[in-house]
């Protein structure tokens, strides 16, 4: 292989690796935003039938985020596989805001994610 072809191969590999790093950084920023939105909310989070304040919900989600990194490679997968249901019972997590009836938190996360991406 000539030097130019080898250089091109190395540079394309570095470019691909930098895109992966940027995608990971973007995902981390999005997940950070979701956790910040949970913390800033006045909502009640319902996990396995028990109500939790935002700070408790964030602590639990951060623990699941750290332990479950191998199960997601995008923010949407984080929402679907980690943040929307109990890994023990399989029950969906619910959220109740401003006196509203509890609803699946998955929809709340997806709306918050869309708002973040539109900024």
Image (spheres, rainbow, N blue to C red):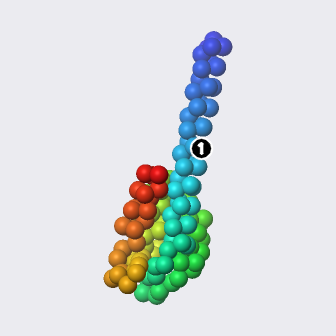
Residue at position x 40%, y 68% in the image: 108
Quadrant position of the N terminus in the picture = top right
Residue 111 or 63: which is nearer the viewer?
A: 111
**Residue 24 in view in this figure:** yes
**What percent of the width, then of the height, locates residue 24?**
56, 49
Q: Is residue 51 left or right of residue 66?
A: left
Q: Is residue 92 left or right of residue 60?
A: left
Secondary structure beneath label 1: helix
Looking at the image, residue 22 lies above or below residue 45: above
Question: Which quarter of the figure has residue 81?
Answer: bottom left
- Residue at the far top: name it: 2
Question: Which quarter of the figure has residue 104?
Answer: bottom left
**What percent of the width, then of the height, locates residue 119?**
47, 52
Question: Could you tell me how many numbered marks the image carries?
Answer: 1
Residue 118 or 18: which is nearer the viewer?
A: 118
Looking at the image, residue 105 lies above or below residue 24: below
**Which residue position holds label 1?**
21
Q: Few, some or many C-alpha atoms within 10 Å of disc 1 (few <14, some 14-19, many ≥20)?
A: few
**What percent of the width, then of the height, locates residue 65?**
56, 65
**Residue 47 in view in this figure:** no
Looking at the image, residue 90 lies above or below residue 68: below
Residue 9 or 21: which is nearer the viewer?
A: 21
Residue at position x 64%, y 19% in the image: 7
Looking at the image, residue 67 lies above or below residue 4: below
**What percent of the width, then of the height, locates residue 63?**
59, 71
Residue 110 or 86: which is nearer the viewer?
A: 110
- Residue at the far bottom: name it: 50
């Amino acid at each position: 292989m000539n030097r130019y072809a080898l250089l091109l191969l190395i540079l394309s590999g570095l470019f691909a690796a930098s895109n992966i790093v940027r995608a990971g950084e973007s995902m981390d920023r999005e997940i950070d935003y979701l956790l910040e939105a949970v913390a800033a909310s006045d909502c009640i989070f319902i996990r396995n039938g028990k109500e939790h304040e935002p700070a408790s919900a964030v602590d639990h989600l951060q623990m699941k985020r750290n332990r479950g990194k191998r199960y997601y490679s995008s923010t949407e997968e984080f929402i679907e596989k980690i943040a929307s249901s109990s890994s023990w019972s399989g029950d969906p997590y619910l959220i109740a805001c401003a006196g509203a009836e509890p609803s699946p938190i998955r929809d709340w996360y997806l709306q918050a994610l869309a708002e973040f991406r539109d900024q």
